[in-house]
Amino acid sequence: MPSTVHAFDAVVVGAGGAGLRAAVELSRQGLRIAVISKLYPTRSHTGAAQGGIAAPLGNVEEDRWEWYAFDTVKGSDYLGDQDAIEILARESVDAIIELEHMGFPFNRTPDGRIDQRRFGGHTREYGQGPVRRACYAADRTGHMILQTLFQQCVKHEVRFFNEFQVLDLVVRDGRVAGVVAYELATGELHGFSARAVLFATGGYGRVFKITSNAHSLTGDGLAIAWRRGVPLEDMEFYQFHPTGIYKMGILLSEAARGEGAILRNDKGERFMERYAPTLKDLAARDVVSRAIHQEIREGRGIGGRDFVHLDFRHLGREVLEKKLPDVTEFVQTYLGLDPAEELVPIQPTAHYGMGGIPTDVDGRVVLDERNTPLPGFYAAGEAACVSVHGANRLGTNSLVDLVVFGRRAGRHMAAFVRESDGVPWPSDAIAEAADRLESLRRRREGQSAAEIREALQTTMMRHASVFRTKESLERARQDVAELKERYQRVRVSDPSRRYNTELLETLELGYLLDVAEAVVVSALNRTESRGAHWREDHPRRDDTAWLKHTLLYRGEDGDHRIAYKPVVITHFQPQERKY
Amino acid sequence: MRVKIHVRRYNPEQDPAPYWAHYEVDVEPTDRLLDALHEIKWRVDGSLSFRRSCAHGVCGSDAMLVNGVNRLACKVLIKDLGPEIRVEPIRGLPVLKDLIVDMEPFFEAYRTVKPYLIVDDEHLPEREQLQSPEERERFDDTTKCILCAACTTSCPIFWANGRYLGPAAIVAAHRFIFDSRDQGAADRLAILDSRDGVWRCRTVFNCTDACPRGIQVTRAIQEVKQAIVSNRLRGDGRAAGAGAAGRAADRLRAE
């Protein structure tokens, strides 16, 4: 198999918000960097984020970073690390002003400043009522972040390797030497020798059947790091966004509820009043997602079925056109409904992994509970776990995470690269990846990746989503183990080298299976309910036993090793969570 | 419902020339065309190759020629296409395999127009630069572009002359030319006032019809043409639209 080795100072894998923000930082500092993406950068899933990006700018009403930090800690169900959250809350202001300076087209107040709106879980004075904290560009905030950062990369002449699938992280003598990637266009393998590598490879929503996530979100970075001995942190915490389009999972932004849309059950009741008397429809996502499921279970889904309604009718056409144009269009295109006049069927949709590759606040990947770094290895964005989202992420905080920690990772990498003498590229690094790829390509018997993937998504949705029990999770674990077994005999029917997208999907399925396993094993282990992890057989949060992060290591033979890391608590002591 | 899907296929590793492949699949009328293509790929023929990612019209991966019109496969529903559907790669870019085309010439044109905010970095304020809602509105439409190439590859001028920068690149330029914060309008207008720039546009409106984001592409091109003309008349290097916007921003700062 033909192959090439490229030498760079640093390599960024993934070209969404975190990867591009880091790339801008690295290229501004004059380093030779490469960005590897399995898509084109402008197609990364950051572009699908709709509603907003939080920062306590105080442009439309009083706000303070301390209130924002508190909301994030509370939203996280006290599992977020408060040192990291403090950085997120403080640096969000500067990160957003910087985006504005790069050209980001924020919606504006009448006096020309960045406009702000409400979002779930964001409050004034430590929970007293909703606050306008989310900066936005209509309901395509993520699209504009992705475009703006890509534009800056064009300006700085960043070198992109588009449609390259990362296959391996190369580690030698306890240090990172680079990555191996597969060029989709040709089928060739490429080594990227680098002193520092950032994984900003995004999430893994495709382990579930109903998801807001792109087809490309298959947990590649997480699985590759895990296979190389890096633990995965807090994988039991997976967020379901309350308002996905029924059956399709396409997201209808929380900005809809921020602008005043209301959830209603079969009786037309605004049921969130019962579950969250203060913030109602703007409670945190885990709370709202569970409330919807509860209504459905108690027979108040629409027509007794498994969805409820989102009601936009009182907002008026102008708000829909000016502030929610994409949401309006999704409803029209995919449901054939006019949200100005008709109720919209929604159900919770798999949305965001709070867990991921453990890092410190500078994006350095850490290997254990003592935060020992793996020199040269960095992670940021949804692939990483800092952890600022803890057990449940607040809306708008994924975008803040990308720009704050993408920037910090870029800065630290630049300093590291300057001080580091680098690791020689191991001559056998590519051969190893080539063997695995070739054996996959040659298999002509067995099941297709599509069949196995569908079975995986079904079992994860049924047994490991919003509500979980020991029994359901054990069932999911068995199913995943059996599917991994079947994956050993997966069949790739397309023999071609050029754009073999079937081979790509088969690789991706391998990553999905690993990540699903991590989710299920972590969830089985945590016998409490916290944030998005809801165990019906352990319905209470248990701070005595479980105020700690899970670190799950991959075992060679299906066994796993679990370690725990303390939660960093600075200002806010855990208390009962009420909205 | 059962639909017939005819797909223009070509794998240069093995096929001497492109050919039509025919499939019949069962899909729901409310399914996306993308769902039908997945049905083929996942159950009938794994070698069928196409790009896709977000599956709801915001990433721009799956632009293709559908029954003779450029569409995103994830944004067009089966019920709106009828029982026989013809799917081909977008035109004017080299076909690499099946529905996958070489996007490099497209992004090359994009890069040519300096698609980033040009400002005097030394004199940026500590907080945000001010911009009125009206100034912001001026370039709102062209910020929607997802670079899917549906517009550029629906343009007969681009088919005839691949050096024409094309609608998407002009949209990218427009987005900055009319941004009151930007100081690079003159540069961009000079680039677009060239042989392969805006004057190639014959106002056919194919681009506007093709845009899955509803951008008034032809109108944006016309506005850029007007800006070039008034820029020439004024001769002061500032674009007409941006100039007016810039003055409004000055007023806001003074207040």
Image: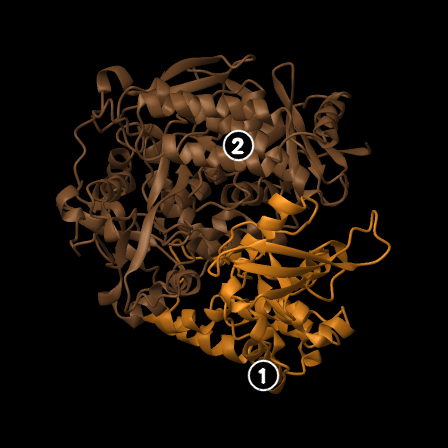
Chain colours: A brown, B orange
Q: Is residue A497 visible?
A: yes
In the image, what residue occupies the spot 52% across and 15% down? A558
Q: Seen in the image, is A260 located left or right of residue A254? A: left
Indicate whether A394 appears above or below B54: above
The alpha-carbon separation of the residues under discs 1 and 2 comes to 52 Å
Q: Is residue A413 visible?
A: no
**Which residue is at the far bottom?**
B233
Q: Nearer the viewer, residue A378 or A24?
A: A378
Q: Nearer the viewer, residue B44 or A168?
A: B44
**What numbered label is drawn on residue A512?**
2
Indicate the position of residue A578 as horizontal and vertical percent values: 16, 37
**Which residue is at the far front?**
B2
Q: Nearer the viewer, residue A157 or A141?
A: A141
Indicate whether A104 appears above or below A363: below
Q: Quadrant of the C terminus of chain B?
A: bottom left
Quadrant in which residue A79 is drawn = top left
Indicate whether A538 appears above or below A406: above
Q: Which residue is mark 1?
A: B226
**Residues beneath discs 1 and 2 located on the same chain:** no
Q: Kindly identify the amino acid type of the residue bearing the numbered disc 1.
A: Gln
Nearest to viewer (mark 1 / mark 2)? 2
Label 1 is found on which chain of the structure? B
Q: Seen in the image, is A460 located left or right of residue B200? A: left
Under circle 1, the secondary element is helix
Label 2 is found on which chain of the structure? A
Indicate the position of residue A422 as horizontal and vertical percent values: 67, 23
**What numbered label is drawn on residue A571?**
none
Under circle 2, the secondary element is helix
Quadrant in which residue A194 is drawn = top right
